[in-house]
Structures are given as C-alpha cells and as structure tokens.
C-alpha cells in the first residue's frame, strides 16, 4: 500500500481527455486524499501513443514508468499495489518502449514530459535556446541558417522556408507579419493540435525568431475553432510569456518587440489555404486570392507576410540552437529534418510518430502501427489528407519523402496517414472526395464550385451501374478541368484521390453481378 508522497503525470491533451483522462485525474486526487498521500499531479501533453490513453506515469529514480490505458476503476488498485511494475497495466519505462525508442523526437521531445504552461520546465528542458541564439544574430544570418537546414513547409506544399523568409525580409512594407496557419483540417491529422496542447512555447519561440528574421513585430495564430483545448492552452501560454517578459515590447530584455494574437477560424476547410486564411484574418469571407502577388510580398492587409504552418515554425528553434548542419543531417534527398507522421483509420496502434524522412510506409504502418485493427489485410492507404492519393498495398514500400511521393502521383502533405482494410469500397471513396470538395469549396472559381458537384453526381451514377464507361470518361475529363482550372489546391487536388482510386482500384468502378439476395428495381 502506498503512503509516501508521489508525483504522477497524466495528459490533458484532447485525445486523452476524450477517453476519460479528466475523470482519472479526479479519481487520483480523491484516492490520494482518502489515503492521506501528498499527490503532485502534473498534467502534460500526450506522448503520441493514443491507443494507450489515458497514459499515467510515475517517476522512480529519474525514470518515468507508464501504466495504460488507465480507467477510473483502475486507480484504487494502482495505489493499493504501489504502482508496481507487475501490475496488469504496467508498461515499464516509457522512454524504453519500442514506439518511443524508434523515433527521433525533436518537435515533440517535451510533449508528455512537462506541464505545457510551466515556463520554468520549458526553459529547463531546452526552451529559449534557439531564441537566445537568434537575438545575437543578424536577420540575414537567421535566414541563412533556415535556408541551409533544408527546412520545407510542413503544411503540405513543402516549399523551402528560407526562400519564403528571404523574400519577405527583402520586400518593402510599413508593417510585416508572421502568420501561423494552425487550421489543421485534414482527416487523420492531429500533429499541430498535439504540439499546441503539449508544448505551446515551442511554437511561440519559432514565431518570435521568424519575426526577428524578416523584421515583423506582429504575429497571428489562425487556429481552428474545432480545437477548444488548443485554443485555451495557446492563449494561456501567450499570456504567460508576456507576463514573464519573453513576449511583448522587450523580449528577454533585448529591446526587441513582438506580439502574438490568436484568432479562431470559423470552420472553413479552405481557410487552410494561405490566401483564404489571410482573407479571414482581415474579417472577410474566407475565399482564395488570385496570385500573384504572393503573401511574402503582399499578404495580410497588403503587407509582406510570412505564412507558415505550426510544425514549420516549431522546427526553427532547434535549427538555431543546434545548427543547420545537424538538422540537414536528418532525412533523405531534399526532404530534410523530421516529420510528424500521424497514423489513423483502421490501425492497431494509432498515434503520432516523429522520425526523419525516408522510412517506408510499410515500416510505419506494419512495424510501428501494428497493421490493421480489424486484423484484415491492408487494401489502401491515403496519405496527405482528404485530397491525398489512395495507394494500394503493393506500394507500401514507398519511402516517406516529398519527391518519392510526387513521382508516384501522390503527396506527403501534412503527414496524415489513414489506413483501410480489404472491405473498403474505393468507388465510394472517390465519390466522397468529390462530395467533400463540393461541401468545402469557397465557391470563387467555377471548376471547383460546379465541377465537384457534377463529379459527385457522375460517380454516384457509376456506382449504380449507369453508363459506366461513358461516365468514367466524363469523370476523367472533369478531373482534368479541376486540376488545370482551379484557383487553389481545394479544386486542384481533388482529382488526386479520385484518379488514384481509378488507377489502382479500377475493379471497384465496374458493374457488379447481383448477389443472391439482391433484386433490381426498375
């Protein structure tokens, strides 16, 4: 029976809360009071092993031991048995688990380790190191480091961050802005949310460094309204940084000024596109802008603006503190550094896995993810969100890097990976892609607004067996029109899942023989 003072760690990440972490926390406090135990319960971010949430940890001799998934009814027995290593829920030292050992955790090394709002713990675990280096360098040197590192935009496009920063730094403007695109709307993605809820200081630090690099004094975080926990955590973190003097008019006593304002999105998927996000930030309807000019030259309120996603900005502190060469040493080809791969769908071990670019889909899904939850064979994998390509099981050896995916007619996107077993109907998935585009289109350009509706209608006819050959030809024509004529990636990339489904799973689009229990309705 445990009676000594004890420190426990339990996530307050949205994923953990969704499966009862708050109830477990309350029960832990109740049992500790009943037993007269001095309990220090530290609420952290998530380690990314979502199949084990709520994951409870206890520190012994400097080593964190895990138990999970823990329910309310497990708490009393855990105390009774002194959180013993032979408890049925015991996982052993968390850092020694294969999932953790197989990763290279740069962005997420503090997630699940510290209270995300504990600034002392943030600094003790390496926070501010990159910012302190940046404050001692010229803007040009900062940009040189980011360029030399090979950092590319993690929002999906993979555009070199250093080039974007150099363009904004050289553009004339009375006021320059740093805009963080945290409108993470792709299905199967949660990397931005996990970082903001688990280590918000890393994002803030990256934004301040970006401001130093391009001469911006104002930053905005555009955060989707569907992430209330992330919104609360980011707002609290910004306030804490301002109170500490790490953010505001005199950053770390340097005389440098930088402020951050958080703005909530209104639920529009297309506002994940940078120009539509800028329109929304300006209080307008979230519609894409015609380019040029690009935002780095004329962005928010017509001023030079850097638009980067959460993980891009969060990568910058390490590049400054550890050096561009150390970052460049990770990855493969032109894909440098690490990527936060998110495993979702029909997967046994879903979660976030941070690793250098270059490992294969097979290794990620089968070795680390454990294959399908259903136990059935993998038939398709969609990478890059709802506009990403569907890849067949025969392509699982494809390396996870930008150029390899582009050559395969796919895209890596934000690193979201959704797995399907052999029961999936790929014709229905293709139809869903068109339906999704029709639902989320901003309506500004005709190919996207009208073409997606016609595409969904035509694929519905194909699935009913109506004029299959002619209607499939029409779908392919519509896809060409969407690709060539759309103003942004919403319409331009919708053909990718449709055409990949047609290319790799053509049999699902053919008329199917009636089953014994089916009848034809004339």
Image (spheres, helix red, strand yellow):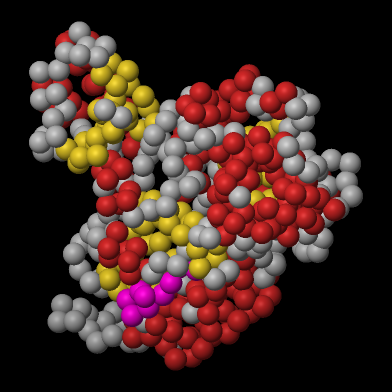
Tell me which residue sits at (62%, 75%) in the image.
Answer: 482
Residue 248 included in the magenta stretch of the image:
no
The percent coordinates of residue 190 (x first, y second) are 45, 49
Q: Quadrant of residue 113?
A: top left
Q: Residue at x 29, y 21 (%)?
A: 7
x 20%, y 40%: residue = 92
Residue 465 showing in the rendered view: no
Figure quadrant of the C terminus: bottom left
Above or below: residue 493 compared with residue 318: below
Q: Is residue 234 left or right of residue 141?
A: left
250 sits left or right of 187 in the view: right
* Quarter-of-image position of residue 209: top right
Q: Position of residue 243 (x, y in %)?
A: 63, 19
What span is colored magenta in the figure?
Answer: 393-401
- Is residue 398 covered in magenta? yes
Residue 291 visible somewhere in the drawing: yes
Q: Main secondary structure of the magenta part?
A: loop
Q: Residue furthest top?
A: 36
Residue at the limit of the structure toward the bottom, as seen here:
469
Does residue 309 lie above or below 404 as drawn?
above
């Amino acid at each position: 029976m445990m009676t000594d003072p004890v420190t426990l760690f339990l996530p307050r990440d949205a994923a953990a809360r969704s499966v009862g972490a708050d109830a477990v926390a309350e029960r832990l406090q109740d049992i500790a009071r009943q037993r007269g135990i001095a309990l220090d319960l530290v609420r952290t971010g998530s380690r990314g092993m979502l199949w084990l949430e709520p994951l409870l940890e206890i520190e012994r001799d400097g080593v964190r031991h895990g138990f999970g998934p823990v329910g309310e009814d497990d708490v009393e027995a855990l105390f009774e048995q002194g959180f013993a290593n032979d408890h049925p829920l015991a996982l052993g030292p968390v850092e020694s688990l294969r999932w953790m050992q197989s990763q290279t955790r740069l962005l997420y090394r503090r997630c699940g380790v510290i209270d995300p709002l504990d600034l002392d713990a943030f600094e003790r675990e390496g926070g501010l190191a990159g910012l302190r280096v940046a404050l001692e360098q010229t803007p040009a040197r900062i940009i040189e480091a980011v360029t030399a590192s090979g950092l590319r935009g993690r929002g999906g496009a993979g555009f070199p961050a250093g080039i974007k920063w150099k363009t904004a730094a050289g553009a004339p403007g009375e006021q320059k802005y740093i805009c963080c695109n945290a409108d993470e709307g792709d299905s199967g993605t949660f990397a931005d949310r996990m970082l903001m809820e688990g280590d918000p200081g890393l994002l803030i630090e990256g934004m301040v460094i970006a401001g130093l690099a391009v001469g911006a004094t104002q930053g905005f975080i555009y955060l989707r309204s569907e992430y209330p926990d992330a919104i609360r955590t980011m707002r609290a973190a910004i306030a804490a940084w301002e109170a500490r003097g790490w953010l505001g008019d005199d950053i770390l006593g340097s005389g440098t000024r930088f402020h951050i304002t958080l703005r909530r999105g209104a639920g529009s998927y297309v506002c994940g596109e940078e120009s539509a996000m800028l329109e929304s930030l300006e209080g307008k309807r979230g519609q894409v802008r015609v380019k040029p000019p690009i935002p780095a030259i004329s962005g928010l309120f017509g001023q030079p603006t850097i638009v980067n996603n959460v993980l891009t900005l969060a990568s910058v502190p390490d590049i400054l503190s550890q050096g561009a060469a150390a970052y460049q040493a990770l990855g493969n080809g032109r894909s440098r550094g690490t990527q936060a791969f998110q495993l979702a769908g029909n997967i046994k071990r879903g979660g976030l896995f941070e690793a250098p670019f270059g490992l294969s889909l097979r290794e990620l899904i089968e070795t680390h993810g454990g294959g399908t939850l259903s136990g059935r064979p993998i038939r398709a994998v969609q990478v890059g969100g709802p506009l990403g390509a569907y890849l067949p099981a025969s392509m699982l050896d494809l390396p996870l890097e930008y150029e390899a995916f582009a050559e395969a007619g796919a895209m890596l996107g934000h690193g979201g990976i959704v797995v399907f077993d052999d029961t999936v109907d790929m014709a229905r998935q293709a139809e869903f892609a068109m339906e999704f585009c029709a639902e989320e289109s901003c309506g500004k350009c005709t190919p996207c607004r009208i073409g997606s509706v016609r595409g969904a209608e035509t694929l519905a006819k194909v699935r009913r067996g109506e004029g299959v050959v002619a209607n499939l030809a029409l779908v392919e024509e519509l896809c060409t029109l969407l690709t060539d004529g759309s103003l942004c990636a919403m319409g331009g990339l919708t053909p990718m899942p449709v055409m990949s489904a047609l290319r790799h799973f053509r049999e699902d689009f053919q008329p199917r023989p009636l089953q014994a229990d089916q009848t034809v309705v004339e």
